[in-house]
Image (spheres, rainbow, N blue to C red):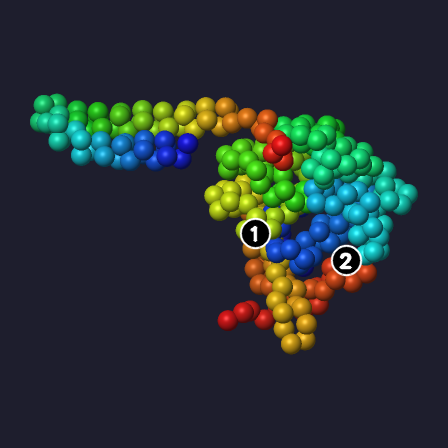
Amino acid sequence: MFLKVTLIVVVANRVDVLLPAYGLTSLMGTETADYAYRTVWSILLLVSFVSLYIDWRNTSLDQPIKPS
Amino acid sequence: MLVERSTGHGCFLLLGKSGVGKSIFALQFIHDGLAAGMKGVYIHTSVPTEGLMEQASSLHLNLDEGDLKERLILIDVYASLAGLPSTSQVVLQQGATLNDLSHAINEATKNLTNFRLVLDDLASVVAYTRPEVAFKFTQVTLSRLRAQKATAIMILIPGVISAEQERLLPTVFDGLLEMDSEETLEGLKRRFRVRTIRNAKHRTDWVQFDIYEGGIQVTAQAPSRA
């Protein structure tokens, strides 16, 4: 769970590097690239929160207090 | 004495090594609540019901007398771990799960508000589960207790559960209380402090205490260790 969130946040943080690296800044123009960067960031963060919630909901308390 | 301003209820984690007086503190906490007319729930995991009552009686905290007995609900997890019969009102069966304990707490505290609860101790309940399961159990239990305006103390001996559990679990509590002891030339010195309490003004210095008939009594402000 924490690994997943860390990965998502790391990727989201590096979007500003990835976009120019693939020539997207010059292709789209700085303003559009900035908009794309913010959009991707927001989507990734949303995905991470939804993923966290799903993990939490799927965590079952049906575990024995003492193993047999 | 240590807390100047607080909401009056909340869920606290009491940390301290074995033998420092955590269970006595918890028994006194329940006893004082019962004596004040509140309901009390004591979840015991490491002693049988009789042992718990004997310990309370030896401190003159008689939980099985008159009105106090009527207001006290005992949830026995020890019996399920040891495979023994029990005289507590609520007894978990052998092989019980965290879900069963969660339901038992829910049933025992149904329709109750402004009561006191003790889990003695949290490590015995979550020691064999994954950190996220322990976290969810604690989170769900404390959420319900907060909604019921309960004051709860859960005991934890540091070092018994995994480091990840120990890092995660304190974050869901409203406050951390610590007990410690050290051997001196004059004998064993016990001390207590409030480490954190959310939304409350409190002192953080250690106070020295001793165990007498009637429970724990603060004897002096403890000098800070170098």
In this view, the residue in front, A27 or B59, is B59
| Disc ID at residue B215 | 2
Label at residue A8: none
Q: Amino acid at mark 1?
A: Pro
Chain letter for mark 1, please. B
Considering the image in quadrants, where does the N terminus of chain B appear?
Answer: bottom right
Residue B106, by quadrant, is top right
Of residues A40 and B85, the one nearer the viewer is B85
**x 66%, y 64%: residue:** B190
Name above or below for residue A48 compared with residue B217: above
Going by the numbered disc 2, the residue's amino acid type is Gly
Say which residue label 1 marks: B158
Q: Is residue B10 left or right of residue B57?
A: left
Label 1: element kind: loop
Residue B159 position, x and y percent, is 54, 51
Say which chain tag 2 marks.
B
At x 29%, y 35%, the residue is A10
Which residue is painted at 47% across and 43% down in the image? B164
Image spot of residue B62 (x, y percent): 85, 50
Q: Please say if B109 is above or below B160.
A: above
Q: Given the current orientation, which residue lies at the most extreme front position?
A: A68
x then y, percent, for residue B224: 55, 69
Q: Nearer the viewer, residue B80 or B212?
A: B80
User: Residue at (74%, 59%) from the top-left corner?
Assistant: B216
Element type at marker 2? strand
